[in-house]
Image (cartoon, rainbow, N blue to C red):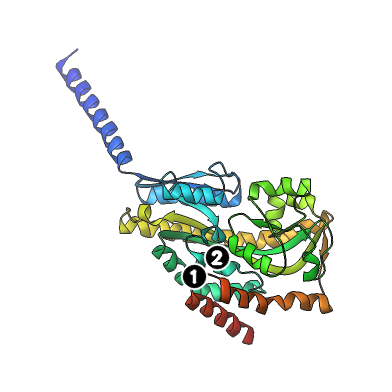
């Protein structure tokens, strides 16, 4: 081998080693957020967050990466939060209600019988979302995305016309939402707490016969195959969050933090728009599959409407919500209704 060829080989080898070392250094300084969710793999939610994660990785030149664990493989939402506390996970795409034990105001929008229309929710959210997120920061969480999931409706195996009818049913509540369970007990209902993954089996075995859930979720989780009726009265508004450990998030540079919030904030808005469209289509799909839609009228409707003030009084006397935020929300709702 000539001296020139030898020199070229040494140069090439040195360049290759330098490249490998550089890649190793970049990877060593990359921060990977492990995110768990109950949403199934391949769902619009998960695919949207993965697309956002890819954009974040590109814009931060690989410094910030996200790895998602869908379908509940990391356990229930309470389990996900425990794993976040001990550092096994850095975040979760979870419901606002699951944060109640750490930060009650995260579930403020989900108080039963509080909102009556999507426009009303949007009016309030435009003025309170930033306060909700700021409170989460104080509690040790960074909410990178806040998604409206739509209204939950009562779906049951036997017809329900008035609120009094509910008291004779076996009603499911999420096992991570003690506030809703406590409220229902005070209203004369004996709720049955179950994890989301156990609800279908509960409906099949007769452990429960009534669920309160957005129609699109009932279809996605196949719960609609085990119920026959839907009461078209909005019971509560559901919210989803992309929640990160504040201690992990704050390790990023300010510039990278801004990119994460910008991208996932946009993703959350896109998911909300898709949820609205899917929710409208879900009502049609349920009706076509034989689910009877019950629209209460007269005294039956009044029995549902009367619950708003009763629930508000219960929350004021027994809830752990911030008095200022709760009052602000109620005033905003009043202002909107007055318009």
Quadrant in the picture for residue 309: bottom right
**Screen quadrant of the N terminus:** top left
**Screen quadrant of the C terminus:** bottom right
Quadrant in the picture for residue 286: bottom right
Q: Is residue 44 above or below residue 304?
A: above
Instruction: Give the residue number, with chain letter if any, for mark 1.
Output: 129
In the image, what residue occupies the spot 58% across and 48% down?
38
Residue 148 in picture, x, y percent from top left: 58, 64
Q: Residue furthest left?
A: 3
Q: Secondary structure at mark 2?
A: helix
Residue 330 in picture, x, y percent from top left: 57, 79
In this rendered view, identify the residue nearer to me: 43 or 17. 43
Residue 250 in picture, x, y percent from top left: 34, 56
In the image, what residue occupies the spot 32% across and 58% down?
255
- Left or right of 154, for residue 66: left
Q: Which mark is residue 107?
A: 2
How many neighbours does mark 1 have within 10 angstroms: few (below 14), some (14-19), or many (20 or more)?
some
């Amino acid at each position: 081998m000539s001296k020139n060829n030898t020199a070229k080989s040494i140069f090439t080898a040195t360049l290759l080693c330098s490249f490998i070392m550089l890649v190793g250094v970049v990877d060593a300084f990359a921060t990977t957020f492990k995110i768990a969710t109950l949403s199934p793999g391949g769902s619009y939610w998960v695919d949207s967050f993965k697309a956002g994660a890819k954009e974040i990785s590109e814009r931060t030149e690989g410094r910030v990466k996200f790895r998602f664990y869908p379908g509940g493989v990391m356990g229930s939402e309470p389990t996900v939060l425990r794993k976040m506390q001990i550092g096994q996970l850095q975040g979760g795409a979870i419901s606002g209600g699951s944060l109640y034990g750490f930060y009650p105001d995260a579930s403020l929008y989900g108080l039963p019988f509080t909102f009556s229309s999507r426009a009303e929710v949007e009016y309030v959210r435009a003025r309170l979302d930033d306060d909700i997120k700021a409170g989460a920061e104080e509690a040790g969480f960074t909410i990178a995305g806040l998604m409206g999931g739509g209204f939950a409706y009562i779906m049951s195996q036997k017809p329900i016309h008035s609120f009094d009818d509910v008291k004779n049913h076996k009603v499911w509540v999420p096992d991570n939402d003690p506030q809703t369970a406590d409220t229902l007990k005070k209203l004369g209902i004996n709720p049955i707490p179950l994890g989301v993954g156990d609800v279908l089996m509960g409906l099949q075995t007769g452990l429960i016969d009534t669920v309160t859930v957005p129609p699109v979720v009932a279809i996605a989780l196949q719960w609609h195959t085990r119920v026959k009726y839907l009461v078209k009265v909005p019971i509560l508004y559901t919210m989803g969050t992309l929640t990160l450990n504040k201690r992990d998030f704050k390790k990023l540079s300010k510039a990278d933090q801004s990119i994460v919030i910008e991208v996932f904030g946009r993703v959350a808005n896109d998911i909300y728009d898709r949820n609205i469209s899917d929710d409208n289509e879900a009502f049609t799909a349920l009706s076509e599959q034989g689910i009877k839609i019950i629209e209460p009228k007269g005294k039956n409707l009044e029995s549902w409407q009367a619950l708003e003030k009763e629930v508000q009084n219960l929350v004021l006397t027994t809830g752990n919500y911030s008095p200022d935020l709760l009052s602000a929300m109620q005033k905003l709702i009043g202002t909107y209704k007055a318009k």
